[in-house]
Image: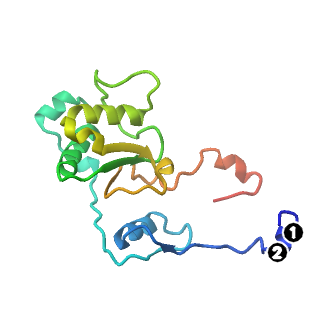
Amino acid sequence: FFEGFAERFSPNRKFSIPTNYRSSQEIVEVGNAVMRGLGEPAKAFSEDAGNVLFASLSDFQPSGGESTQFSGDDLTPALLRLANRYLSDGETMILLSRKNSLPYDVNYGRQSPRVGASNLDRLLHNIRFCLPEDLRDKLSISTTHRFKGGERKTVVILDALESCYPLIHPDIIFTRVLGDDL
């Protein structure tokens, strides 16, 4: 198959898997909007409408106490509010980021581990520290790549920014010299 690939398979033929069997219609529609122009849109197999909530961190207003506790950091108090809301209802929740770093200023506080922990692990530790003990294990964090194929009822995309999805390698300009492009 390797030696005769071109004869067996047309190298210019593209294959797609158009049906998403895992996600609800609304999730698939959001994914299609993010990836518009970068391939064939997916179709949802499930007739479940799903529930997608959009929130912008720029619209979040921390309380006075939150501003004092997390000076200069709006992300952590916003995530704490979401976690308390959904985890208290008995759900599990995952925080996802495209990379191990965050595109925000985060005040990790004194309780965060310093050595050997990624920014995502430090954020998770900090949020768990502020949650009631019975809710802490219901919250997890991951990169989207590492979580691929996983499922949770409540998912928070930490870096839903145009520069993060799709992630284009910064060295793409060098590969263009060789004729490669997006």
On the image, the x and y values in percent for residue 79 come to: 26, 43
10 Å crowding of disc 1: few (<14), some (14-19), many (20+) = few
Lateral position of residue 116 relative to residue 81, left or right: right
Q: Quadrant of the N terminus?
A: bottom right
At mark 1, the secondary structure is loop
Q: Is residue 82 above or below residue 24?
A: above
In the image: residue 55, left or right of residue 20: left
At x 34%, y 70%, the residue is 26
Amino acid under label 1?
Gly
Q: Residues within 10 Å of mark 2 (few under 14, many from 20)?
A: few
Tell me which residue sits at (31%, 28%) in the image: 108
Instruction: Tell me the tag on residue 8.
Output: 2
Query: Is 63 placed left or right of 25 in the picture?
Result: left
**Percent of width and height locating residue 44:** 43, 75
Please state which amino acid type lies under the numbered disc 2: Arg
Task: Relative to 181, say whether 62 is above or below.
Answer: above
Asked if disc 1 and disc 2 are in contact, CB closer than 8 Å, the reply is yes
